[in-house]
Amino acid sequence: MGKFFLIGIPNCGKSTLGRLTADILKLPFFDTDTMARDRLKPGGSDSIFSSVFKQRFVDAQHAAIAELAGFDGDAIIATGAEISLMLECVQSMRTTGTIILIKRKPELVLEDLRNNGKRRIVLRDEANGMEIDMQENFVKHYMDNYSCYESIADLSLDNNGSEDEGVQKLVVLINQWQTGNI
C-alpha cells in the first residue's frame, strides 16, 4: 500500500480524516503534530502554542518526518501545516510515499474554528486594543502559502462536505491510487 502523507492548511481535516481512514484500511496512523508535542513535553496548550513560534517545534516536526520516512511499512500520516514549507521534509515525503493535499474552503475552516467549542487563543494588541484570534491568523498565513501545498501534492481531495464524505473520498482515492486507476 505505501505511506500516504496528508498535507494542508491547519484544520482542513488531515488528522480526523487520516485517523478514520487508517482505521478503515487497517493501517497504522501517525500525526506529526502529536509526535512533535510529545517530543517537547509542554505544560499545556499555551506552551504548545508559544512553541510553534520557536524553532523547537519546527525541529520536532522535522524529526517526526525523518522518523516516519524511515518507518518500514504502510501508514497514513497527518502532517503539521508547516511541514509542506520545509524543503527537507518535502523531499523525505516525496521519496518515501505519496503526498495528498486535503483541500477545505478557508471560510469552512474558519467557521469550524469558531464553532468547535475549544478555547480560543487570542492575543491583545496593547497599542490599539485589538484582539487577534491566533487560530484564524494561522489559517490565513498558510492560505498565503497555498501554492506550496499544491506544487508538492501527488493527489488532492476536496473536503468541503461532512466528515463521513471526506473519509469515503479519501478511502476511494487511496484505493484508486493503489490500483493505478488515477
Image: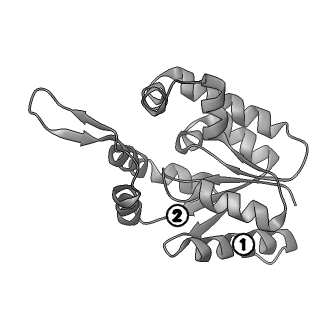
Q: Position of residue 25 (x, y in %)?
A: 82, 66
Quarter of the image for residue 2 reads bottom right
Residue under pointer 1: 173
As drawn, 117 above or below 156 = above
Residue drawn at (39%, 66%) of the image: 108
Numbered tag placed on residue 103 in the rendering: 2
Residue 152 in sight: yes
- Tell whether 96 sits left or right of 78: right
Mark 2 is on which residue type? Answer: Lys
Residue drawn at (72%, 65%) of the image: 21
Query: Helix, strand, or loop for circle 1?
Result: helix
Residue drawn at (63%, 62%) of the image: 17
- CB within 8 Å, label 2 to label 1: no
Front in this rendered view, residue 148 or 125: 125
Numbered tag placed on residue 15 in the rendering: none
For marks 2 and 1, give the CA distance: 14 Å
